[in-house]
Amino acid sequence: MRKVFGICKCFYTENIFLKEFNIHVTYINKTQFLKDYSPILKELGCKCPKHIPEQIEEEVTRRKQLQGDSASRHKHIIQRYVPKNPSVYKLQPYCLQPALLELVTLAQRRDVTAAQLSARLRCLPQRVFALPLFTREFCRHLLEELRHFEASDMPKGRPNTMNNHGLLLDELGMNPEFFDVLRDEYIRPITAVLYPEYGGASLDSHRVFVVKYKLGEDEDLACHFDNAELSLNVALNEGYEGGELYLSHMAEGPATDDRVVYRHQVGVAALHRGQHLHGAMPIEDGERYNLIMWLRSSEVRNQRCPMCRRRPNILPVTFGTGDGFVQFTEDVCAAT
Ligand SMILES: O=C(O)CCC(=O)C(=O)O
Ligand SMILES: [Fe+2]
């Protein structure tokens, strides 16, 4: 049997973001859409909802081409791009804060409890943690590399419709020797202890990207939940105003009053559950770069897609790990 990663079919019909009106919608067809959303859109100031389906169909076409486009950009980049800092493509001891290594050692002790591990971390309400992760030196090198890549004539995939100025790091080839290793050897031992019931012990894929906020570009991030079991969000720079991360309550849980406002610190990651509603406040000055890892467990998501909340209808992908769902297919042997 062969393990193949995939996406859930709902990616083509659900959670489509209309930036202008700041809402996520479901689109099966034009009739359904207009029936379900015309009143809401009018309330939000849309003069002519009839024009929206065209815009959505374009987005669905983009989504259908995403895997193929990403695969060809990756191939192009691997063949032609000359990195400025090759050292950031391979996880090395200098990249990680010593405090992280101590936490990993503690987390790997057979009898350790979540309370013991949490006692060594900065804990915010609602199971949000501040995890010391990257050294300042590594953050500087990575940012330098990303700016060099941005300035090149290489093709660039952007994180999503809410983030149009960041970069997808798998396209640059950073997964095999950096982020896969980081996930398996350093993050999973910790999440296994902190979030066992959210797939913390069985994380087996991720989506990693950098988001950028600047006045005149993307200035904030609307409140959302991630297509992830767990999310890691680490600041790569400082020297900007505003742009705090806020977290409110779990997407399916009751609303709570204790909204968490998290002020980023270079190299420190905010670790939270993917279904925890969150967003970024408007940037007021400067540029803010954060590295985001949407951490996924196929064991968990194969039972229930976090986006449509049904048992996933899995479509296999040929490049990368899709949205982290896994299917097993019979190996087809060529007849000889
Ligand atoms: O920029 C941030 O702090 C949040 C980013 C985020 O939540 C995301 O990209 O999913
Ligand atoms: Fe997010």
Image: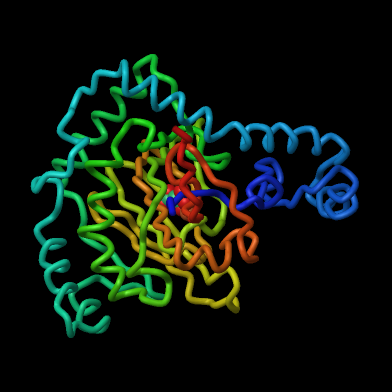
- In this view, the residue in front, 84 or 20, is 84
- In this view, the residue in front, 274 or 285, is 274
Q: Quadrant of residue 140?
A: top left
- Image quarter hosting the N terminus: bottom left
- In this view, the residue in front, 56 or 211, is 56
Give left or right: position of 113 versus 19. left
Residue 254 image position (x, y, % from top left)? 60, 79
- Image quarter hosting the C terminus: top left
Residue 117 image position (x, y, % from top left)? 21, 77
Q: Quadrant of residue 46?
A: top right
Residue 110 image position (x, y, % from top left)? 17, 81
The residue sitting at the front extreme is 336
Image point (36%, 57%), residue name:
204
Q: How is the image coloured?
A: rainbow
Can residue 201 be seen?
A: yes
Task: Tally the numbered discs.
Answer: 0
Residue 263 image position (x, y, % from top left)? 34, 58
Image point (35%, 66%), residue name:
202
Residue 119 to residue 259: above or below: below
Q: Quadrant of residue 198?
A: bottom left
Residue 76 to residue 262: above or below: above
Can residue 243 be seen?
A: no
Image point (46%, 41%), residue name:
333
Give left or right: position of 213 versus 184. right
